[in-house]
Amino acid sequence: MVRIPGRRRSWARTALVGVAVLLTALLPAGAAAKPKPHAGATFANPVRNTVSDPYVIRAGGYYYLTSTDGCDGGWLCVWKSATLSGFGSAEKHAVWQIPSGAPNSTEVWAPEIHQIGGTFYIYYTAGTGAAHRMYVLQATTSDPTGAYAEADTGYPHGQLHESSDQWAIDPSVFPAADGTLYAVWSGWRSTSDTAQRIYLARMSDPLHVSSDRVEIAAPTRPWETVGNPDQPDQGSVGYFPVNEGPVGFRHGGKTYITYSASFCGTRSYAVGLLTNGSGDLTDAASWTKTGPILKYHGKEIGTASFAPVTSPDGTADWFVVHDNTTGCDPGRRLRLQPLYWDARDGSPLLGYPVDDGVQLPVPSGEPGSVPNTDPYASGWGDAFGDAAEGDATDGRRTGDWTVTDTRTASVTTPGGTAWSQLFYASNPNYEDFTVSADVRWTATGSTSAYPKYGIYASYADRANHVEVFVDRQYGVLATHAVVQGVEQPWQNSPLPAGFDPAQYHTIRVVKGGPTYTFLLDGTQAQRRTFTGSTFPVLLNGQPGLVTEDTAADYRNVAVTDTY
């Protein structure tokens, strides 16, 4: 086994009285770590400016992009690029002139290019106010960058008609496992509705919806309803219930629909997920909602409008989103990141949005690329947050770890004063969740004055994390945090009488926003609410395993009750 040098800063404490002593300070403000160089060619986000509601397909060895913004006035465009990372210099092709004085001549939004049965289509939304409806363009040639015309759907101007004939935007289409085509979109229940919902219906062909719509999601969770003003630190958050921009796809035997939630002009615009294991897609009860699976982090805000895409050689998955610099339109930008899959349940694992300028390896198959690998295939790995911010030192897997399976791991050698840590590779964007682990002590080193073992309740980045430890030397359960770069006091609770660290004990933490409830073997030991100077305060983060100069075994590690 190769030992990974411990780089994690160590915080010592005087356990019996709870006085915090900072042995090794955080890096001073502005002292950013140098990014680790990547082998092969790299790129940095944003990939292209003035892109909203991006959708990308690959056909005939090229990638094709559609966007609400960035085209010539009065036109829809398709951008063509040989590579995903090269969309900044992509060819722009104006493919359809928006008519004047027609129902589909105003507020032309969210065009999506699709290839179905060898023919190219562009699905889009147009209209004013409650008159918004879905429409289809069909390529008049076999060239996806050639001319398009209003498709012959049997309704004026190529309207993609569905039986409710209600307000509808953001149409997308996808095939089910049996090849049946489905349409999915955002709509209202009626003209008096105040919430955007996700609807789905079967299609008989690319131009016709053949079943009544079914509502499969509504904005019922707080993170789906944020509007302007988006200033929770000042006690002011607008109410704007939105589920929109749905995109359907399949992976690992499951059907997924991603969608965007909250108002597009806020930093809180985020990506949610609907999952259908094997049920009838038109049965609303067969869909499960989770999320957010991507939300603002670091310097990146308003990251939503997700679409998956594969690398040029077909060996790796990536995704595109836009971010928000000045509001909904036209200041959004195209971003590209690796798409991983959760080793436990197979769901999309997006991590955090990567900051501008942080170098990423180009997708495999592009010139100068190296094969893209999944660093989270075992269910464990580095933390997402520090890497997304360009910090090549903090938040890394450190210490001698043996991974048995996706819920079981051991640190086999006491690692001295530097913390040994291993992060649970799961969605770090949940704002409320429960993390639990069964853990037992196996050995103590001779270096640290405060040996201990425990878990990260949440780790967003080096400046925002919460942890809980068992300290067998002083007989306490100890909690600690760093919030917005400021260390919080250690707080200790006595271990139960007769506590045997060589036996498995369950540590469980319930996170509700900035409030954490710490339990040991089912009994509450502490509850702490952490405050900071600005919003957000410990908005989210991923769990992990962590020890100081201690070897320990972990089993049944799980994240539940996500919300």
Image: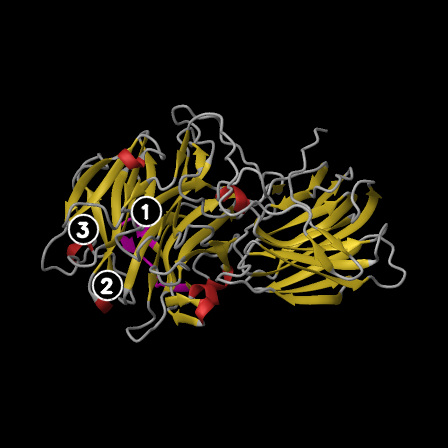
Residue drawn at point x = 43 percent, y = 64 percent: 224
Which residue type carries mark 2? His
Mark 3 and mark 2 residues within 8 Å of each other at the beta carbon: no
Q: Which residue is mark 2?
A: 132
Work out whether 361 lies above or below 512.
above
Which amino acid type is marked by label 3?
A: Asp
Residue, disc 1 = 333
Using the image, determine if residue 139 lies above or below residue 157.
Answer: above
Find residue 271 and report its horizontal and vertical position in percent: 43, 55
Q: Is residue 140 left or right of residue 546?
A: left
Q: Which x, y percent locates residue 223?
A: 46, 64
Label 1 or label 3, whichever lies nearer to me, is 1
Measure the alpha-carbon separation of dots 1 and 3.
33 Å
Q: Which element carries disc 3, helix, strand or loop?
A: loop
Q: Which mark is residue 152?
A: 3
Magenta residues span: 203-215
